[in-house]
Amino acid sequence: MKFLDADGYQSLQLDIVGFLAILGESSVLVQSQVAALSYFFLLPRLVPAPQALIRTSRPERLEPSTGKVVGAYSGGFRDRVNHLAHLLHEGNTLPAYSVRCEKVTYTANLSSDVKARLFGPITWLSILGLFMSGALLGLAIGLNDGFALVAILALSFLSTLVGIGNRWSLKLRQRVANRAVPPSDVVLNYPNGSFLIIKCDEYTARQLYWHPEECDYMVGPTAYRAISLCGTLILMFGVICLGNATLNLQVGFAASYIILNAAYWVVAALPAKWNWDLSSYRVERIKYEGPEQMVTFTEALWKAIAITQTAHWVSVGSIAPVSKGWENWIKEAEHVAQSGPGVWDEKADVVRELPKWDYNAALTEHLDEASATNKV
């Protein structure tokens, strides 16, 4: 079995290597928004699938997660969980029917606003791309390959150009009025039936849970469209030059893009929180008696009501089924929660007690009564 003809290595065909430069869109896109927060995003470097960053329009807000945000006492409601809140509380790690309570405090340290982590995984991707670009540039000069030199300069400058077009800063809404408001605690309810009760002040609640995170871009939409047009032309020109490079440089480009694609896939598989600097917010776990993960939705709902000591948010967020039996059960659950022992204590290491109540027997009783009434 033969792979090469009589010319040996020189017979190897790598005209397709240009396609390697535009593969890997999904792994680039999944981390592009947080990457554009970092100044390393402006480095001239090799980036797999740079066309993924050349879009007709840019996201105006960070992508939210599926779930409900309900004000425990304020009556507020949103049908999406903000991106930063989801990352901060690691909502994707909550098991089904689990109930967790956390206290969030804003540190008010202006030097540690929410931003990309300085030396997070995406930073090392930029450094790796810069290293690959420099190595290929030196190789092209050493082998006197003009097409390869132009290709590496074009593709490296392209990353800086699209970096300028996508560069943004995070804009979190601030509270303006100073009027008296109800307690600002919120309840996050995820589709898997889990509940996350957050104890925080109004300032933190508005930043993380109520107002969407807005992207404040460095250049306006008109300038961005011009950058996208120039970037598209540079990309096509660079790929054409890459296809006309000598075999040795094409092998170098192929190896570089294969390594970069693998690295981007690995980083895309890592927890997204690793790329963010959320040190502006301190999160403390508030402990309550019993396991965190419940067996049924009813048990989880009762524990969430017992912790908040109110069921107002259940109806506001349409959390429970709508029926007379459930309505009566929710009213009784709120009464039991409010008549039980006090559950809030500022000490984070204290295990707090919850009221004792046979929630299952009570639900069965209320549903049977509602069913009997309907039959009459």
Image: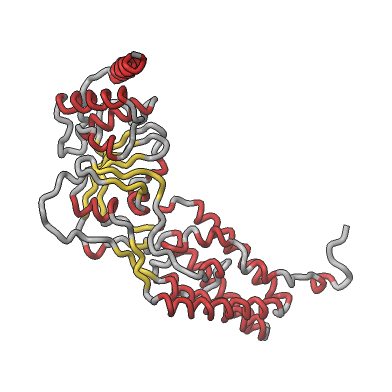
Residue drawn at (26%, 53%), measured in percent from left and top? 281
Is residue 75 or residue 217 the one in the foreground? 75
Residue 24 in the image, given as x and y percentages of width and height? 59, 61
Q: Is residue 51 left or right of residue 338?
A: right
- Count the marks: 0
Is residue 328 or residue 97 the one in the foreground? 328
Which quadrant holds residue 101? Answer: top left
Which quadrant holds residue 213? Answer: bottom left
Residue 77 in the image, given as x and y percentages of width and height? 29, 46
In this view, 254 is above or below 229: above
Q: Is residue 303 left or right of residue 43?
A: left
In this view, 40 is above or below 261: below
Residue drawn at (62%, 69%), measured in percent from left and top? 21
Q: Is residue 158 left or right of residue 119?
A: right
Residue 89 in the image, given as x and y percentages of width and height? 33, 46
Residue drawn at (51%, 61%), measured in percent from left and top? 29
How is the protein colored in the picture?
secondary structure
In this view, 193 is above or below 115: above
Residue 219 in the image, given as x and y percentages of width and height? 39, 76
Q: Quadrant of the C terminus?
A: top left
Residue drawn at (51%, 74%), measured in percent from left and top? 159
Q: Quadrant of the N terminus?
A: bottom right
Is residue 352 or residue 33 the one in the foreground? 33
